[in-house]
Image (tube, rainbow, N blue to C red):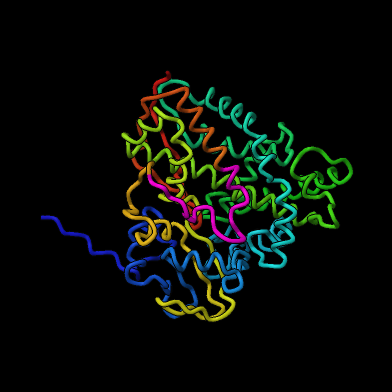
Amino acid sequence: MTTEAAPIKPSDYLPISPEVRRDPYPYYEAMRRQSPVHQVVPGMPFYALTRYEEVAHALHHPEQFSSTAFREISQGSGATGPGGANAQILAGHRILDAPMLIAVDPPEHGRMRRIVNRGFTPRRIAALEPRIRELADLYLDKALVGDRFDLQAGLAIPLPVTVIAELLGIEPGRRDEFKHWSDCIVFGLSGLSSFERDEVRRAADEMEAYFEGMIEDRRRSPCDDLISVLVAAEEGEALSADEVMTFCVLLLIAGNETTTNLIGNAMKALLQHPEQLAEVQADPALIPGMLEEAVRYESPVQGIPRLTTGDVEFEAGTIPKDSRVMVLIASANRDSARFPDPDRFDIHRNPQGHLGFGHGIHFCLGAALARLEARIAFEELFRRATDFRLETREIVPHDSLLVRGPRELEISFRLH
């Protein structure tokens, strides 16, 4: 005799619980139905927004929902601070001490965004395609040996890390160090890191020393790289050395983690829907639409924190001033009021309006680059191999409260 599991209630949602991290979507659905403006911890000013309407509103109204809540994450404190002990080690560290683009509001946000936009123009991003394709082939040469490989370790992780390193102007001989710094800081901030406390601090110190020297060098002798763009004075506007460093950290988190998880989540969804995988392999023109659906279906960024600047009234409830709010993008992207049959992965769906890359003034600066890298990754993978099968018995997500993607994705294949 089997006993049916008790239905999930909104009160069961606890962001740090292993059950939620393993599969958050039933919890999101329960909150959307019963408590769309949900007080996560009774008696504490910590809320979650779950429906498309309220999430889009919060993202579009920085005057009500301040991005300064991100500062608590970087300092490892507060109700929304998922970084834990490792993030607290970095509290006050120079690489996190200056304002970060995603953690400031207007008018400061506008100044910083104008400067960094110079490094992400459509022309500059489009010009990267040949090099990204070359890198994808390079990593696939190493990965497609034998009859199986880990997509994450073989392609989804190294491709965006190398692209960001080259954009910044990191010399090839330092890229292994760059990857190690990235891992320590990304997982020290965004999750329950397995890195030793001293290792996280040492990585931050080494990165600070490296970028400090690089920034000074680029001020004296500009090159054709992103750091040169960021420190170049134009119409009296340039980023300070500390602002450049915090932007580099942001690129590590947003530029690497988002793209890595997009590739992994998309492949996982295709492997779980083999008929759709076959369609995409047969027609590579379906890849861009498939990727948009993958972002909607399993958002690489699950939620972002905000801080209310005053009482905010919604039809579903009121959030008091100075409340920490987790704006659950991934839940909004599964809202049936916006996307019919939202729990179904469908490469032929039109997911226009999904919030996977954000909305409003904080729309993801690197969205075009992430789309380009992911498209090329799948084009090159499908060009070279076929008969993909998922070999990972249990797909384990990263220990993170903000981003979602598989730690590994072991896949068997056959070369064309």
Of all residues, the one furthest to the top in this rendering is 416
Of all residues, the one furthest to the left in this rendering is 1
Residue 206 visible? The answer is: no
Q: Position of residue 22 (x, y in %)?
A: 38, 53
Q: Is residue 351 magenta?
A: yes
Quarter assignment of residue 338 = bottom left
From the viewer's perspective, is 25 left or right of 320? Answer: left
Residue 333 visible? The answer is: yes
Dominant SS in magenta: loop
Asked if 396 appears above or below 4 in the picture, the reply is above
Q: Residue at x 63, y 42 (%)?
A: 180
Give the position of the N terminus as an image quadrant.
bottom left
Q: Residue at x 64, y 30 (%)?
A: 131
Q: Residue at x 54, y 22 (%)?
A: 141
Q: Position of residue 349 (x, y in %)?
A: 38, 46
Q: Position of residue 146 (x, y in %)?
A: 43, 20
Give the position of the C terminus as an image quadrant.
top left
Quarter assignment of residue 342 = bottom left
From the viewer's perspective, is 139 left or right of 350? Answer: right
Q: Is residue 65 magenta?
A: no
- Which residue range is magenta in the image? 349-370
Q: Nearer the viewer, residue 237 or 186?
A: 237
Q: Residue at x 53, y 61 (%)?
A: 304
Asked if 179 appears above or below 336 in the picture, the reply is above
Q: Nearer the viewer, residue 412 or 110?
A: 110
Q: Position of residue 261 (x, y in %)?
A: 49, 45
